[in-house]
Amino acid sequence: MPAEALEHSPASRSNVLLGPNRCPEAKTAIGAHFPRCLTAVLDGFGLHDLDRRCFNSGRQHRSDRAGDDERRFVVCARAQVMRPRLFFSWLLVVLLWHASIAAEQSAPQSIILATTTSLDNSGLLAKILPVFTKETGITVDVVAQGTGRALQTAARDQADLVLAHDPEAEQEFITEGHGLDRRQIAWNDFIVVGPRSDPAHIGGGRDAVGALAAIASAKALFVSRGDKSGTDALEHRLWRFAGIDPAQTIDGSWYRNIGAGMAAALAAAQSIRAYTITDRGTWSSSGKKGDLPVLVEGDPRLLNRYDVILLNPAKHPVPKQALARRLAVWLLSPEGQAAIGAYEVDGEQLFHPSAAFPK
């Protein structure tokens, strides 16, 4: 048969384009680079076996005339001509599906962390959260409030995870069904600070309850946060232990309830030369050590524990539970604990990791 006739014969068209002798590189490319779903679509529409469909019967009945082979090819080809169109329609759908998944996976991921102000004001979160974000790609938006308000924020589904330091309020939050799986991540301590003149003569003591009683007796100025924070809750517990309600004392002007965070309380105490109770981390980071020295420390009742609390999915089916759990797990992991322990201000370690050995 002449070369031109061979080139344009039905069998040659089939074998060259789609038959068993088609380009091996093409088969390799399909196997190596096509997603499985696309290969399945290709096979599903039979685009790989047009030669078999159109010519098997011709091979089986070699006595058929060449004209019959030609007609058979034309009819079969017409029957198959719509398959490529349908295939490319499905190909477009699959590619768009893959693109949407890729876009979703590459989209920025973030969670909202409701936390006590002391972890924020001390600088700890600004130090360790970028490490978590670099490792996971998850950005953490911090809402720093007193513990009471932080728990309320989470209860309203306005946060994905909570860091707090008020054991009584945390237990109530869990009892009400809002949280579960509370774990301690670190601890430090509360301290009583005040003016160098120390009008209540409490300096050097270790009895926080006795110190507050002495402050009340001397009617020395005292700044209270009054913001339902963990520090505020600790202060009021100490007043109860002392049997004193400072707001009800005669001439209670010495007791200043400012309704603000720890940094503001320290600034107010410095301004009016007053006593206050603070967590050591915020005090160390405040730059007010000289004006507000530590006067009372070391009382076991001044222990300050920090806990991470996951929301209860049965009551709060927030969409980012899985991302929030990754942060909680990281804070408890050796890497997260090391980051917490490594944070220092002026060479002083402010937080002691305690996931392995809770206080």
Image: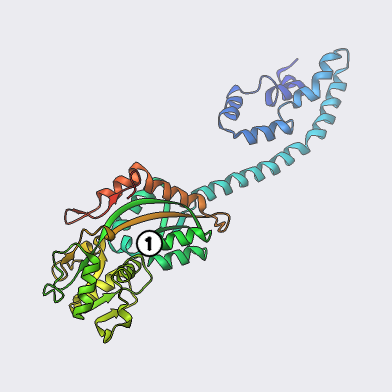
- In this view, the residue farthest toward the top is 63
Q: Is residue 218 left or right of residue 68?
A: left
Within 10 Å of disc 1 (Cα), the crowding (few <14, some 14-19, many 20+) is many
Q: Report the front residue among 346 and 91.
A: 346
- Residue 261: x and y in percent read 32, 71
Q: In this orientation, which residue lies closer to the viewer: 235 or 339?
A: 235
Relative to 50, say whether 344 is above or below.
Answer: below
The quarter of the image holding the N terminus is top right
Q: Residue furthest front?
A: 243
Residue 13 picture location, percent across and down: 73, 25
In the picture as drawn, the residue positioned furthest to the left comes out as: 197
Question: Can residue 37 be seen in the rendering of this structure?
Answer: yes
Which residue lies under the disc numbered 1?
166
* Left or right: 304, with 56 as reference point: left
Residue 354 is situated, as x and y percent measured from the top left of the image, at: 32, 48
Residue at point 66%, 41% (across, down): 91
Place of residue 342 in the rendered image (x, y in percent of width and height, measured from the top left): 25, 48
The kind of residue tagged 1 is Asp
Q: Tell me: residue 309, above or below residue 143.
A: above
Q: Secondary structure at mark 1?
A: loop
Would residue 113 be seen by someone viewing this image from the given angle? no
Q: Residue at the spot x=27%, y=70% of the render? A: 263
**Colour pattern of the rendering:** rainbow
Query: Number of callouts in the render?
Result: 1
Depth order, front residue of 132/109 = 132
Residue 21 placement, left or right of 359 = right
Which image quadrant for residue 170?
Answer: bottom left
Residue 271: quarter of image: bottom left
